[in-house]
Amino acid sequence: MSLDSTPRVLSIQSHVVHGYVGNKSAVFPLQLLGFEVDAINTVQFSTHGAYPHRHKGTILKNEDMETIFEGLQLNGVDYYTHFLTGYSMSPDSLKKITQLVKKLREKNPNLIYVCDPVMGDNGQMYVPEAILPIYRDTVIPLADIITPNQFEAEWITGLEMKDLAGALKVIGALHDKGAKTVVLSSTILGDEKSMISIASNKESCYQILIPKIDATFIGTGDLFASLFLAWSHKTNNNLKLTLEKTIATLQHIVRDTYEKARAIQPTGIMSPALLELRLIPNKTTIENPQITINCSKVTYERI
Ligand SMILES: Nc1ncnc2c1ncn2[C@@H]1O[C@H](COP(=O)(O)OP(=O)(O)O)[C@@H](O)[C@H]1O
Ligand code: PXP
């Protein structure tokens, strides 16, 4: 049983010493939004993988993940309202996560499991390919909410999306695998200048059009998943408002990050270090995002 009504998240993601991806991107916003967060770090890397010297560091062994969880159980602090998972390096660690979902649901049958199937972006995998079938066949069927980007959703379903109709087919296929709420964190459907994020559940489906900034941000997917979790809870599962608040926060942060980086380097491709997400200076936006872009309803038939 929970001690009070505070939502409690167990977040299993990467940790970087410098910068903002994985738990470094997710924990601070969740805490600001009133969540107690317990974090298990799947890796401890110097930086994320897009830096020129890639990431250096250590990977959590499966037996260590098990020992840590056992410690939580033995001390009776393993009650969570939400489980959030992201960057995982091996099929075995994903299998462990599957077991954890089951254990957490024994403790709280109403647990909400949010799975960000972090595998890659822009045609590039960040993690070993052997992870794909485990996400597809074992993990996603257990999830309440999934937040793949376009690349990840296409990989999982084996379907390409070139337009909205294609994206809706992919969403339908992901629902068929068992995911109750499917959110495509970003897609590019024809127009290279805008991104579309789409969220769908049993009752409804919404899309939101985002002007694309000409830069590559890392950690935005992890931030997206944590914000979507938080606003789903805070709006009592209002899908439209959740997507609007999530995008409002992200847009403010990516724009501010880009503008501050451009002030330092006025032209040329900016380094990953310059484009680390400015989470801390945007604390008030995370707490109280001002909606500037509205969602529109999408009607489609689930086959
Ligand atoms: N270049 C960009 N321009 C504008 N917004 C962006 C950009 N990159 C990311 N975002 C924002 O971050 C969100 C998540 O980005 P996404 O690329 O899907 O994450 P990832 O690929 O890291 O999983 C998008 O919905 C969008 O709001
Ligand atoms: C260590 C680590 N965690 C997580 C991510 C995922 O980042 P994103 O939120 O952009 O998908 C990356 C991407 O390079 C990474 O290197």
Image (cartoon, rainbow, N blue to C red):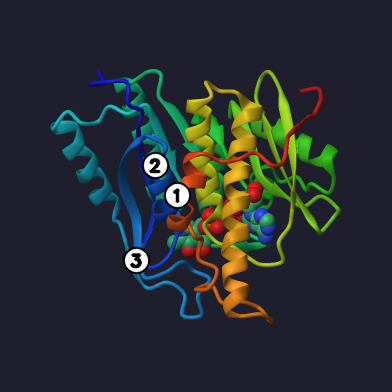
Quarter of the figure that contains the C terminus = top right
Is residue 54 toward the left or the right of residue 256 in the image? left
- How far, Cα to Cα, is label 3 from label 1? 20 Å
Q: Quadrant of residue 84 in the image?
A: top left
Indicate the amino acid at tag 3.
Val
Q: Are marks 2 and 3 in contact (CB under 8 Å)?
A: no
Closer to the camera in the image, 54 or 257 = 257
Which residue is depicted at the point 24% across and 49% down?
63
Residue denoted by label 1: 283
Of pointers 2 and 3, the one earlier in the residue sequence: 3
Q: Earlier in the sequence, mark 3 or mark 1?
A: 3
At which x and y percent is residue 134?
Answer: 51, 43
| Amino acid type of the residue that numbered disc 1 sits on in the rendered structure | Lys
- Under circle 3, the secondary element is loop
**Does residue 267 sit above or below 18 in this rendering?**
below
Badge 2 local density, few (<14 within 10 Å), some, or many (20+)? some
Q: CA distance from mark 2 to mark 3?
A: 20 Å
Q: Quadrant of the N terminus?
A: top left
Classed neighbour count for the residue bearing mark 1: other residues with Cα under 10 Å, few (<14), some (14–19), many (≥20): some
Residue where numbered disc 2 is placed: 32
Residue 102 rendering spot, x and y as whole percentages: 37, 28
Which residue shows up at 53% across the image and 24% down it? 235
Query: Looking at this view, is 287 or 207 the one in front?
Result: 287
Q: Are dots 1 and 2 in contact, CB under 8 Å? A: yes
Q: For marks 1 and 2, give the CA distance.
A: 8 Å
Name above or below for residue 199 compared with residue 154. Answer: above
- Residue 152 seen anywhere in this rendered image of the structure: no
Residue most extreme to the left:
75
Q: Nearer the viewer, residue 89 or 230?
A: 230
Residue for badge 3? 17
